[in-house]
Amino acid sequence: MAQEYQMIASSKIKELSRIAQFILMNCLPRIQLRKKTESLNILFLVPLYHTNMLAMVESLKRANHSIGVIAAKEENIENYELLSPLFLKKIIESEQSLEALPFKLPDLIFLRDHHPSMIEIANKLAGPQTKLYHYNQKPLRRKRGIRNLIKDLKRLRAHQIKGVPLHGFSPVDHHESINNRWPKKLLTRTFNFPVFEYPCADSIPLTPLKRIQVLMVGKLAQPRKRHFWFIDALKSSGIQVHLKICGSGLDLEFDDGTRSREYYFELKKCAESTDDSDPLLITLHEDINFYELSKYYSEAQIFALPSVQEEFGISVLEAMAHSCAVIVSDECGSARHITDGVDGLVFPSADYIAFEKKVHRLLQDSALRISIQNQAKRTTTKKHNYSQFAESIESLANQ
C-alpha cells in the first residue's frame, strides 16, 4: 500500500515538474514571428456574447483584423450590430455551420468557455501556427507561499488534462492582491478592457437641475448588485436626488442561478412608491437597448456599483468614460482601475457605513464631484482606448 502511494505521489511530482519546465521555457526571450501590421484572424469562444465584448470586437475590427465569435448560448439582450456570433447548439447539429466564420484558419484563438465541445472546436479549427490562449475574469494573482504555488501548478495541470491552453490573461486584479503585492498566477498576464465608444449623446443642458442625477446599471433581479444599499444611502442623505436604474429584467429563462423573483418585484415596488414630492425619486429602465445607455450615462453625475461577487463590472468604466463620479466596491474587478479620491471612490465591500459616507461625500461636495468626473474621463481615455487594446492582442500573435 505504501509502495503504491509512493508511485502515485512520484507520478504527480513528475507531472508538476513537466509543467514547471514548460513555464521555465516560456520565460525565455520570444521571437517576433510576424509583422505587427499584418491582419489577423481572431476567434473568441465564449459562454455568452456579452455586451462587454462589443468594444473588444470593434477595436480589433478598426485595426483591420477579422473577428469570429462562437457562443455557448444566447441571451435576449445581446447586440448583433457589429457581429453575429455562431452558437454551439447549431454547430453540434451541423459542423457545416462553422463555414459561416469569416475565415478558415484563425491566427489567434481565445477560449473563455471550457466546455468539452468548445475545446474540441478550438482544437479542430487551430492550425500549426495558431496560438491558443484562455481568458477569464478571475483574479489575476495568487497568495504567497509554497502551498499556493503548488495549487497554481495543479491548476495548470488540470487545464492540461482538459485541453485548455495553459497561457491565459485576465483583466481582474483586486485591490487587496495589488496592495499585498501578491505574485501573478503562472503563465497569466493582465490586460485592460477597452471602453465602448458610444455614438455622441445629445448635449446635456448646463442649467442647474433640481435634483442631482445618479445612476446604477445592473440586472434588476440580481441581489448581489445590492441596489438597496444605494437606495438607502441616498435616502439617508436627505438631498434631492433622481436615481435611474438600468438593467435587464427578470428573464428567468436566462437565469444562471443568480436572479431572484422576490428581489425583482421588491425593487419595482420600491421605485413605484416614489414620486416627485419625495427627496429621492427612483425610475427603473428595464431591458433598454445597449446604445441607449449612453444617454443615461451622460445625464448622470454620480454612478455607483456596490456589488459583491462582481468579476469585473464594465459599467464602471463606461460611466467613467461619460465623466461620471463613480463609487465602487473593492470586490469589483474594475475597482483596480480607480485611484481612490482621484478618479473615483472605492469602499470595502462588507462595510455599508463606509459606502454610505462615500455617497454622502459626493452628494455634498460639488467641487470633489466635479474634480473626480473630469479625472475619470481622462483615465479611461488614456488606459482603455481601442488602439491600446488592439496592440495588446497583436503582441500575443507577435511572440
Image (tube, rainbow, N blue to C red):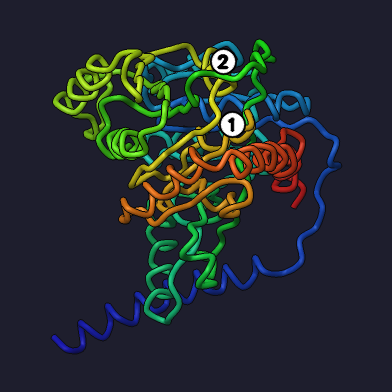
User: Relative to 107, does residue 63 appear above or below in the rendering?
Assistant: above
Q: Is residue 114 left or right of residue 84?
A: left
Q: Which residue is at 52% across, 40% downward?
A: 326
Judge the density around disc 1: few (<14), some (14-19), many (≥20) Cα neighbours within 10 Å.
Answer: many
Residue 22, position as x, y percentages in the image:
57, 68
In this view, the residue in front, 163 or 28, is 28
- Residue 307 seen in the current view: yes
- What is the secondary structure assignment of the residue under circle 1? strand
- The answer to which image quadrant residue 59 occupies is top right
N-terminal of the pair, mark 1 or mark 2, is 1
User: Relative to 375, does residue 152 appear above or below in the rendering?
Assistant: below
- The answer to which image quadrant residue 201 occupies is top right
Residue 2, position as x, y percentages in the image:
17, 89
User: Relative to 212, does residue 1 appear above or below in the rendering?
Assistant: below
* Tag in front: 1 or 2: 2
Residue at the spot of label 2? 295
Report the disc number at residue 43.
1
Q: Is residue 270 left or right of residue 98?
A: left
Q: Amino acid at mark 2?
A: Lys
Report the disc number at residue 113.
none
In this view, the residue in front, 340 or 164, is 340
Q: Which residue is at 22% across, 23% downward?
A: 264
